[in-house]
Amino acid sequence: MTYTRRASPLHAARASIGAGYCAALILAVILTKQPLILGALALATTLAAIGSGVGPRVARSLLYSIPMAVLVAVVNALVARDGLTVLARFGDWGPFGQVDPTLEALCFGAVVGLQLVVVVAICALASAAVDPDEVLRSLRRFSFRSALTATLATRMVPLLALDARRIGEAQRSRVDGASRAAIMRAITANALDRSLDIAATLEVRGYGAARRPPRNGRPISRHDLAFIASALAVAALALVASARSLAPFRFYPTIAGPFGVTQYALALAFIALGLAPFAQRRGIMR
Amino acid sequence: MNVLELDGVSYSYPRAKAPALDKVSLSIGEGELVLLAGLSASGKSTLLGVASGVVPHFHGGSFEGHAEVCGLDLRDSGPARIAEHVGTLFQDPETQVVMSTVRAELAFPLENRGHDAVAVARGVEEVALALGIESLLERATAELSGGELQRAALAAALAGRPRLIVLDEPTSQLDPVAGDELLGLLRRLNEEWGTTIVLAEHRLERCLAAADRVIALDRGAVACDAPPSEFLDWAREHAPALETPGARLIASLGLEPPPAGVKAARATLRAHGLLPPPAPPSFAQPPRRRRASRGAPQQPLRFERVWHELSGGRAILAAVSFELAPGELVALLGRNGAGKSTLLRHAAGLREPTRGKVSAAGHVALLLQNPGAYFVHDRVGDELPEALLEAAGLAHLAARHPRDLSGGERQRLALAIVGGDEASVLCLDEPTRGMDRKAKADLAAHLRERAAGGAAVIVATHDPEFAASFATRAILMADGRVIADAQPAAILSGGWYFATETARILGGYAGALTAEQGLAALRAPAAAKVLR
């Protein structure tokens, strides 16, 4: 939740366009279950994060998303009743019924898990490379109260993280240990105090009487154009591929799906279209 | 024309027993620079709250009387409306920014007023240039230091060119350099832009010289409203805790008038032939005996070439070596980011050195900047066993909520919680933030008492006057290194920033740091020869 301006094409594009680019990538991920295409989108996201100078931030998101993906795969294998290739017979588990995990259910769960990992990575890319202030400003034009809530939340998260660290250090310095419940109560009380302080600052900056903010006066840059084109192309390709079943993939009753020229071409196209805006390095410092 | 007009204003916070403001009547004219003085809880912040509209509109409570801010009746206009004319800066820089980048922070108040994109861009550029923060515009607010944050917040408050700006102890969390820079900026805004400034501050000696007028509050009522010199006359008789060290020095020499600043004090001394000749600059060096020595008897605290290096970042501590003897009272000085807080965390074992060694004999108690972080219960009595509460002199407050204690009481409770009464080393990080002079004097007395009992005490502070009041040794840090380690007189009398007001008045003469030491130095037989 802490945005830092860096010299990269994605940072140089306006926030609404950067957010649109990330949304197009997410759309492409959601519309396909083809492992090759998903792999290509994962690669495009990784390279986009590196190209934006936020690779480590995006990599940290994997710490949370990969365990979730593994959980999804395992749970699906245990609860799904579809698929013909039985991997093991665990017998009758009472209320859960007959638990016979199949290869197909495991693979389906793994692919859904991969989708989850890539979507979380794209969200991490957006939070690290898209200016939240600009996004909130755009949001203020349409919904004042939602923008106020989001503004408070984005400011409170890093502030409370800092406070939690301080309170943690203070508690480590105590001679006697305080109970977890007492510490949680103290943290909650502190969070309420902090939110009041932030709300008071918003008040004295005139937020209570905020008028509709002006349109962004910045001229359209080459990066804005490149990312608009990339987002539209990625979204269009994903929709066409989905509508025309260019990358079909079936998990049940048995795994089946072509890995032919069309699929490889689609995968390469997603990578090329997704990364094309990063080729332009002029004017990336603001 | 008046920008602030109060007539019989009384105000009580919700559920408060006593009023925070009591029949206050005053008016502040356009272009004035007014200093609000008073002990803690005297009503300074509440008065500033009235000027910005957060009292009573944001805090609630009961309000009587009539208040007008820049022609707006407070009953009809809330903080958002008043913000079109008034810029506000609170005490804590961390809660003063609401956006992720400095540029967005500065644009925010202008956008709220409905300015078009061109006017917003121009306003941001102008205020950034005026305050010299144009290099910060693209920086993330989360990465700024305390001084930078406070300047960004001041710029946001000024972005709409307000007629009145109110500031609540804006320098309390800044080092002397950043604090002086901020006060210099305010002075310039007042003189060049004609902005009316109302400033609440405990360290009056820092800003009295710039003020046109001082309003002293006592228990919510106006006790004095006069120019600085007359205020000092009043303070000498009615509120000695508000008297500046310079005024105390001049008064104790039997001279008149009381000086509002260093320049006036020097002029008075010069006129009476009492100004010592300028002393040559002295730069204290770390004496060899301070360095950690192998095989020596175990001292309460010893740092041996301690490094703290961030992975992929800079070194916060660089080969720091020193040791503390029992009963020593050490002031740890340096700019924000010099490494003082990190050093104290190492002393208490909250950090591990990346190189070097920290060794302590006995318990090291650490009191961090915010004592509130130690409190986890709703009653003071639940925070500590009865015997410890008794020993800390807080038994009579057992039924109170820790947050309802005064600044000094909170410090004492937090110190007792971290085992300060039993510790062989006591580390305090910026304990005087927001404290008035009386509370500081009480704390200094407590520290001296602990040192007399054999504890080694080390206190990180930005307040040279407080350092001079308790320390027997001073350590000056910069960029993670100890750059001077000597007696306080050698460090606090030889510089511009880390110097007391008395030292600046006397130009470091005889190492005098306090008014009392200055008086003794000027009356010493040796002074007669120098001043002849």
Image (cartoon, rainbow, N blue to C red):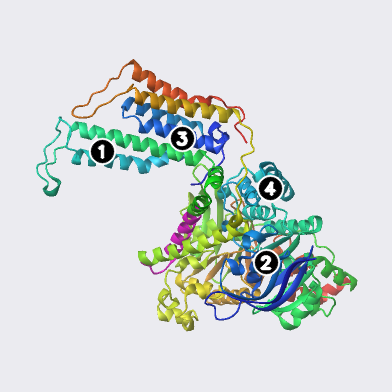
> How far is disc 3 from disc 1 in space, using C-alphas?
25 Å
Q: Amino acid at mark 2?
A: Ala
What residue sits right under mark 2 in the picture? B51
Which is more toward the observer, B76 or B408? B76
What residue sits right under mark 4 in the picture? B133
- Discs 3, 1 touching: Cβ within 8 Å: no
Q: Earlier in the sequence, mark 2 or mark 4?
A: 2
> How far is disc 1 from disc 4 in space, using C-alphas?
52 Å
SS state under label 2: helix
The disc numbered 4 marks a residue on which chain? B
The disc numbered 1 marks a residue on which chain? A
- The magenta stretch is A158-179
Residue B298 in view:
yes
Q: Amino acid at mark 1?
A: Ala
Q: Name the disc covering residue A22, or none.
A: 3
> Which residue is farthest front?
B76
Task: Tell me, yes or no, whether the highlighted magenta stretch contains residue A112.
Answer: no
The disc numbered 2 marks a residue on which chain? B
Q: Name the disc covering residue B25, or none.
A: none
Q: Residues within 10 Å of mark 4 (few under 14, many from 20)?
A: some
Q: Name the disc covering residue A73, or none.
A: 1
Is residue B414 left or right of B252 when viewed as pictured? left
